[in-house]
Every structure is written in C-alpha cells, then in structure tokens.
Image (cartoon, helix red, strand yellow):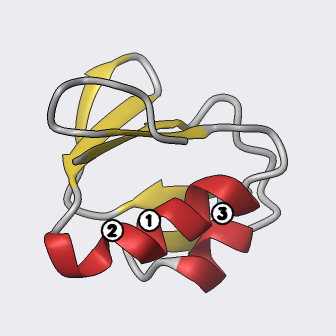
Amino acid sequence: MHVEYDRDTCIGMFQCVEEWGAFEENRDDGKADLADSEETDEDLFVREVPEDAELDAEFAARACPVDAIRLYDDDGERVV
C-alpha cells in the first residue's frame, strides 16, 4: 500500500497528524508534511505505508477535509 499526499490541496487542519504519525505539522507553511516521502510531482508526495500503519494511514486519509490524501493498494487500486 502507498499514500499520495497533495500538499498544495492541504488547508492545514492537521487532522491527519492526529491519525498517523507520518504526518507532521508545519506551522511555518500552514500545511502538513509527510515524513519519509518523495516528491514525485510539484507538491505531490508519495511513500509506502508499513503494514502495521495501514489502518492509521486510512484514518488520516478519511479525516482530511479536502481529500488531499489518497491511499492505493499494491495493485494500484484506490482504497481511500
């Protein structure tokens, strides 16, 4: 499973931070940061989700009020 995070879409509610420790508050920018991610396109960050964090990642994606976080399974199908 991997997560894609569209930082440009983020509005800085930081609900994802409460759900999954991979997201960190960046008060300077007013947006969340996704730790250990790679920027694949401008403001699009991707990282693998460890098996033991899949549920937390799903909660983070569901908690995002602007759908800036998307989860995909190993077959590339969108989960959230």
Disc on the earlier residue, 3 or 2:
3
Disc on the earlier residue, 3 or 1:
3
Picture quadrant of residue 54: bottom left
Q: Which amino acid does label 3 sit on?
A: Asp
Label 3 to label 1: alpha-carbon separation: 24 Å
Question: Of helix, strand and loop, which one carries label 2?
Answer: helix
Q: Which amino acid does label 2 sit on?
A: Glu
Q: Residue 43, position in %: x, y?
A: 47, 27
Q: What residue type is labelled 1?
A: Ala
Q: Which quarter shows the C terminus? A: top right
Residue named by callout 1: 57
Count of residue discs: 3
* Residue at (16% x, 69% y) in the render: 50
Q: Nearer the viewer, mark 3 or mark 2?
A: 2
Q: Residue 25, position in %: x, y?
A: 59, 73
Q: Which of marks 3 and 1 is in front?
A: 1
Q: Is residue 46 above or below residue 23?
A: above
Label 2 to label 1: alpha-carbon separation: 5 Å
Q: Can residue 18 be seen in this view?
A: yes
| Relative to 35, 79 lies left or right | right
State the mark number for residue 23: none
Residue named by callout 3: 28
Q: For the residues labelled 2 and 1, say whether their Cβ atoms are less than 8 Å apart.
A: yes
Q: In this view, does 76 lie above or below 18?
A: above
| Relative to 75, 2 lies left or right | right
Q: Residue 34, position in %: x, y?
A: 39, 58
* Residue at the extreme top: 41
Q: Nearer the viewer, residue 24 or 68?
A: 68
State the mark number for residue 54: 2
Picture quadrant of residue 75: top left
